[in-house]
Image: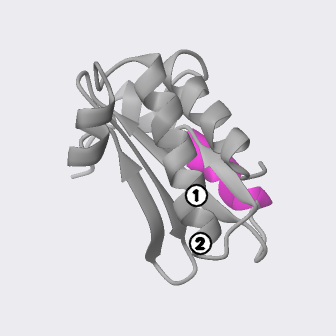
Amino acid sequence: MVRKLSKEERRRARVRRKLKTRAGEDRLRLSVFRSHKYIYAQVIDDAKGHTLAAASSNEPDMRKKLKSTGNVEAAFEVGKLLAERAKKAGVEKVYFDRGGYLYHGRVKALADGAREGGLSF
Protein backbone atom coordinates (compact mmCIF):
# COMPACT_ATOMS: atom_id res chain seq x y z
CA MET A 1 0.00 0.00 0.00
CA VAL A 2 1.36 3.41 -0.98
CA ARG A 3 1.41 6.16 1.64
CA LYS A 4 -0.17 9.46 0.66
CA LEU A 5 2.31 12.36 0.74
CA SER A 6 1.55 15.44 2.81
CA LYS A 7 1.35 18.86 1.19
CA GLU A 8 4.80 19.75 2.54
CA GLU A 9 6.33 16.56 1.13
CA ARG A 10 4.76 17.22 -2.28
CA ARG A 11 6.11 20.79 -2.35
CA ARG A 12 9.58 19.56 -1.38
CA ALA A 13 9.49 16.86 -4.06
CA ARG A 14 8.33 19.36 -6.70
CA VAL A 15 11.19 21.75 -5.93
CA ARG A 16 13.74 18.92 -5.93
CA ARG A 17 12.37 17.54 -9.23
CA LYS A 18 12.82 20.93 -10.92
CA LEU A 19 16.40 21.10 -9.65
CA LYS A 20 17.19 17.62 -10.95
CA THR A 21 15.98 18.49 -14.45
CA ARG A 22 18.36 21.49 -14.57
CA ALA A 23 21.19 19.90 -12.61
CA GLY A 24 24.52 19.60 -14.35
CA GLU A 25 27.89 18.32 -13.27
CA ASP A 26 29.19 21.83 -12.54
CA ARG A 27 26.77 22.74 -9.73
CA LEU A 28 25.94 21.29 -6.35
CA ARG A 29 22.82 21.69 -4.22
CA LEU A 30 22.49 24.12 -1.31
CA SER A 31 19.77 22.62 0.87
CA VAL A 32 17.94 24.53 3.61
CA PHE A 33 16.05 23.27 6.66
CA ARG A 34 14.43 25.57 9.15
CA SER A 35 12.87 24.83 12.49
CA HIS A 36 11.27 27.29 14.85
CA LYS A 37 14.47 27.81 16.84
CA TYR A 38 17.29 27.24 14.31
CA ILE A 39 18.16 27.24 10.61
CA TYR A 40 20.44 24.72 8.92
CA ALA A 41 22.06 24.70 5.48
CA GLN A 42 24.39 22.35 3.65
CA VAL A 43 26.04 21.99 0.26
CA ILE A 44 25.44 18.50 -1.12
CA ASP A 45 26.99 16.59 -4.03
CA ASP A 46 24.05 14.43 -5.13
CA ALA A 47 26.14 12.40 -7.57
CA LYS A 48 28.39 11.13 -4.78
CA GLY A 49 25.95 11.50 -1.90
CA HIS A 50 28.35 13.60 0.17
CA THR A 51 27.92 16.80 2.16
CA LEU A 52 30.79 19.16 1.39
CA ALA A 53 29.95 22.05 3.73
CA ALA A 54 27.37 22.68 6.43
CA ALA A 55 26.43 25.45 8.83
CA SER A 56 23.67 26.08 11.34
CA SER A 57 22.58 28.58 13.92
CA ASN A 58 22.77 25.77 16.49
CA GLU A 59 26.59 25.71 16.52
CA PRO A 60 28.14 26.91 19.82
CA ASP A 61 30.11 29.81 18.29
CA MET A 62 27.03 31.02 16.40
CA ARG A 63 24.86 30.85 19.52
CA LYS A 64 27.39 32.99 21.40
CA LYS A 65 27.63 35.47 18.53
CA LEU A 66 23.88 35.88 17.93
CA LYS A 67 21.22 37.35 20.18
CA SER A 68 18.59 34.95 18.81
CA THR A 69 19.12 31.83 16.67
CA GLY A 70 15.76 31.75 14.90
CA ASN A 71 15.50 35.13 13.20
CA VAL A 72 16.48 36.76 9.91
CA GLU A 73 19.82 38.05 11.21
CA ALA A 74 20.82 34.55 12.31
CA ALA A 75 19.89 33.14 8.91
CA PHE A 76 22.00 35.77 7.15
CA GLU A 77 25.03 34.92 9.32
CA VAL A 78 24.55 31.20 8.67
CA GLY A 79 24.49 31.91 4.93
CA LYS A 80 27.77 33.82 5.14
CA LEU A 81 29.39 31.07 7.23
CA LEU A 82 28.21 28.38 4.81
CA ALA A 83 29.60 30.33 1.84
CA GLU A 84 32.96 30.65 3.57
CA ARG A 85 33.10 26.90 4.27
CA ALA A 86 31.93 26.02 0.75
CA LYS A 87 34.62 28.21 -0.83
CA LYS A 88 37.25 26.41 1.29
CA ALA A 89 35.89 23.15 -0.12
CA GLY A 90 36.24 24.52 -3.68
CA VAL A 91 32.55 25.20 -4.37
CA GLU A 92 31.47 28.43 -6.03
CA LYS A 93 28.28 27.60 -7.98
CA VAL A 94 25.24 25.95 -6.41
CA TYR A 95 21.54 25.40 -6.96
CA PHE A 96 19.38 26.77 -4.14
CA ASP A 97 17.04 24.08 -2.79
CA ARG A 98 14.55 25.91 -0.61
CA GLY A 99 13.01 22.58 0.40
CA GLY A 100 9.37 23.53 -0.08
CA TYR A 101 9.64 26.68 2.04
CA LEU A 102 8.56 29.99 0.56
CA TYR A 103 11.41 32.20 -0.61
CA HIS A 104 11.02 34.98 1.95
CA GLY A 105 12.04 35.75 5.50
CA ARG A 106 14.73 33.48 6.93
CA VAL A 107 15.14 31.42 3.74
CA LYS A 108 15.72 34.55 1.65
CA ALA A 109 18.09 35.97 4.28
CA LEU A 110 20.17 32.77 4.19
CA ALA A 111 20.36 33.00 0.41
CA ASP A 112 21.41 36.66 0.58
CA GLY A 113 24.10 35.82 3.13
CA ALA A 114 25.43 33.04 0.94
CA ARG A 115 25.54 35.38 -2.05
CA GLU A 116 27.38 38.00 -0.02
CA GLY A 117 29.83 35.31 1.08
CA GLY A 118 30.69 34.54 -2.52
CA LEU A 119 28.42 31.72 -3.70
CA SER A 120 26.60 32.20 -6.99
CA PHE A 121 23.17 30.74 -7.80
Return the x and y of residue 55 as percentages of the image width and height.
40, 52
Return the x and y of residue 66 as percentages of the image width and height.
32, 27
Return the x and y of residue 87 as percentages of the image width and height.
64, 66
Q: Is residue 94 above or below residue 103?
A: below
Residue ranking furthest to the front: 65
**90 on left or right of 39:** right
Q: Is residue 102 above or below residue 121?
A: above
Residue that label 2 marks: 88
Numbered circle sitting on residue 84: 1
Which region shows up in magenta? Answer: 14-22
Type of amino acid at the residue the image marks with label 2: Lys
Badge 1 marks a residue whose secondary structure is: helix
Mark 1 residue crowding within 10 angstroms, few (<14) / some (14–19) / many (20+): many
**35 on left or right of 53:** left
Residue ranking furthest to the bottom: 48
- The answer for how far apart the CA atoms under marks 1 and 2 are is 6 Å
Given residues 95 and 90, the one toward you in this image is: 90
Does the CB distance between marks 1 and 2 fall below 8 Å? yes
Mark 2 residue crowding within 10 angstroms, few (<14) / some (14–19) / many (20+): few
Return the x and y of residue 85 as percentages of the image width and height.
52, 63
Residue at 73 percent across and 67 percent down: it is 27
User: Does the image show residue 114?
Assistant: yes
Given residues 36 and 98, the one toward you in this image is: 36
User: Does the image show residue 100?
Assistant: no
Residue at 57 percent across and 49 percent down: it is 16
